[in-house]
Image: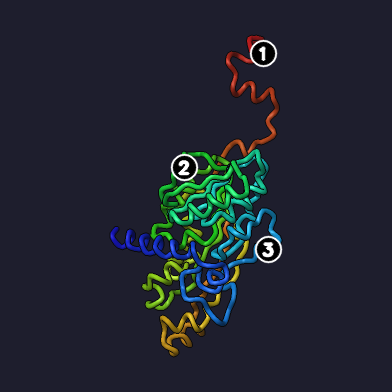
Amino acid sequence: MKKEQDIKAAVKERYSKIAKQGKAENAASCCGATTPSNKVYNIMMDDYSGTRGHVEDADLGLGCGLPTQFAKIKSGDTVIDLGSGAGNDCFVARHETGQAGKVIGVDFTPEMIKKARINAEKLGYNNVEFREGDIDDMPVSDNLADVIVSNCVLNLVPDKQKVISEIYRVLKPGGHFSISDIVLLGELPVSLREDAEMYAGCVSGAIQKEDYLQYIKDAGFQNLQLQKEKPITIPDDILEKYLSQHEIDEFKKGSTGIFSITVYAEKPGAMKEKPNLKMAELQVEGACCEPNSGCC
């Protein structure tokens, strides 16, 4: 337990500093946490330019995908963004759900919450709110959200199964999620796995792709889909901080792969399976007395 709390404290401290960094610095590093690379720009992030609802001031370059692009958000939906940062994915989701919907961002870094609230106030969005809290113990009621999104955040949490169970709890029956995250194929070198900075940089905190998908199935989700997958390459000038040249060469020619994936799954729910009930059928299911008796 102490190790888990130590990891959370290290991530919170690092992301408090990241909140004050520029987008270019974040995008050229591993999720903003490592020293920026001189060799590769946009190591993990996808380009939001042209995405409807994108707010430049809220885009810190910390993501590894575009989950809102795949999230099937509808007008009037309640959407929760896990690890909402400065609010960018919340504002993209708000564009899709409209004024009739609601968007809640959850983040455990006070500096990020403050930054996101300032951005929302500037935009005049009164249906977007930001709550401080852990995503493995969300400050959100049961069965609240139609859609949950998250962008490169679950890999930062030590107990990923607990986060997935929280997602299940908070989604309405029939609701769904679309999450972008970092996963592995093969084992990382020990020095990368154990370094706190690389954990905050989304890499050493990542788990095996097969295990990640199995956790989702075990939680009870259905209709799991891999919506997008792309390889992530860590530049030599970052790897040199952790590995010898020989270790870098072995790492590159080995079987280990680091990938960004975007995963979709649904919480089982009867109402989504029968959306076209006739009014008469609804009256029978919720009748106050015997059908056809004339009392309703």
If the image is split into quadrants, where does the N terminus sit? bottom left
Question: Up-down: is 290 above or below 173?
Answer: above
Q: Earlier in the sequence, mark 3 or mark 1?
A: 3
Question: Which disc number belongs to residue 292?
Answer: 1
If the image is split into quadrants, where does the C terminus sit? top right
Question: Up-down: is 189 above or below 137?
Answer: below
Select label 1 or label 2 by which is in front. Answer: 2
Q: Identity of the amino acid at label 2?
A: Val
Place of residue 114 in the rendered image (x, y in percent of width and height, measured from the top left):
48, 52
Q: Earlier in the sequence, mark 2 or mark 3?
A: 3
Question: Up-down: is 106 above or below 243?
Answer: above
**Circle 3 Cα neighbour tier, 10 Å, few/some/many (<14 / 14–19 / ≥20):** few
Q: Which residue is mark 2?
A: 140
Q: Identity of the amino acid at label 3?
A: Ser
Q: Quadrant of residue 25?
A: bottom right
Left or right: 284 with respect to 107? right
Q: Residue drawn 42% across and 65% down?
A: 14
Q: Identity of the amino acid at label 1?
A: Asn
